[in-house]
Image (cartoon, helix red, strand yellow):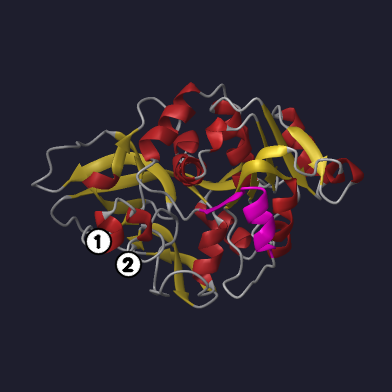
Amino acid sequence: MKAIQFTGLGIAGLADLDEPELAPGHALVRVMASGLCHTDIDVLHGRYGNGAFPLVPGHEYAGIVEMVADDVTDVRPGDRVAIDPNIPCGTCRSCRKGLTNLCDRLEAYGVSRNGGFAQYSAVKTGHLHDIGHLPFHIAALAEPLACVLNGLGNAHAVRAKNALVFGAGPIGLLMALSLQAEGVENVSIADINEDRLSFAQSLGLTPIVSGSAALGKQVKAFDFVADATGIARVVEDMIAYTADGGTALVFGVSAPDARIQIAPFEIFRRQISLVGSHSLNRNIPDALAILQRDNGTMARLVSHRLPLADLLPYLAKGAATPQTMKVQFSAE
């Protein structure tokens, strides 16, 4: 089968691999759509995960069950499914507390085990979720949307009357649209890229230019503020825009050695909740439910549907433009 394979730090190419063998409890999934995430680039360069090369990346994917192991009774060939990539141990303290995304020995398809940038993927059946008639390219948004829902749940964001998201990339837009879908009345999104802000406005969001006078007037204005940029300075500044008694969510992935300065008195005096979020925690069903009732707005985040070979330049960011949103491998 054809697959993208990481063979070492910074080394990615198209490979001909054997189809995965089916272990007990597994299904063979014919991958129909698989989204590119910045985490894939971090994995390639050893900034995320344990550098388990060679590796087939891709953790945002959906497809059709092709065959199942002899002991499998919960899925069958022909089922249309989305994949939950996280593989927790189930026994560590975090897992016992229900925080499977914080597992001490967390693995994941596309990060430490072969994932979805291939024609076929072998997946434990407990990680497969039925997508009904949802198009595959939309179902492949379930994983990043599930990460968003995990963050919004931790922050109790749906209680907010208004919200501000920093970063109008795919994940920031997905978060802003999720806030809208969950009933937050006014959702603004800030970025320095005016093309992305124009696109955000076409999705029904309120655009604000980062660093502008308009944003400066919004100090203490938002019940919920989130960073989806991973830029430490943005994380540091977002407290200023959080209303008294509000919540600020650190969602973007900053560099591990990045540091910020926040006045503890500010957090204390204004009763600010500062919340973090990592990955997803069994949120795929909720994500699929939102995608099922979406009117097509979230689907507009998929800007490119490409064959495997054409995906390779995006791993080096050489093909991306300001108009690039979610890039996917598509078998359709």
Image location of residue 77, percent across then percent down: 22, 36
The quarter holding residue 256 reads bottom right
Q: CA distance from mark 2 to mark 1?
A: 8 Å
Image location of residue 6, percent across then percent down: 46, 70
Q: Is residue 151 visible?
A: yes
Residue extent of the magenta highlight: 262-276
Please tell me how crowded label 2 is: few (under 14), some (14-19), or many (20+) other residues with Cα within 10 Å: some
Give the residue drawn at x 40%, y 55%: 118
Considering only vertical position in the picture, is 250 above or below 138?
A: below
Q: Which amino acid type corresponds to the residue marked 1 in the rendered image?
A: Cys
Q: Is residue 19 visible?
A: no
Secondary structure under the numbered disc 2 in the rendered image: loop
Considering only vertical position in the picture, is 283 above or below 206?
A: below
In this picture, residue 25 sits left or right of residue 182 = left
Secondary structure under the numbered disc 1 in the rendered image: loop
Q: Nearer the viewer, residue 22 or 16?
A: 22
Numbered label attached to residue 89: 1
The quarter holding residue 105 reads bottom left
Please tell me how crowded label 1 is: few (under 14), some (14-19), or many (20+) other residues with Cα within 10 Å: some
Image location of residue 243, percent across then percent down: 70, 41
In the picture, which quadrant includes the N terminus? Answer: bottom left
Residue 224 part of the magenta segment: no
Give the residue drawn at x 54%, y 67%: 42
Numbered label attached to residue 13: none
In this picture, residue 240 sits left or right of residue 20 = right
Find disc 2 in the rendering and name its residue.
104
Residue contact at pointers 2 and 1, CB within 8 angstroms: yes
Q: Nearer the viewer, residue 314 or 242?
A: 242
Residue 265 part of the magenta segment: yes
Q: Which amino acid type corresponds to the residue marked 2 in the rendered image?
A: Asp
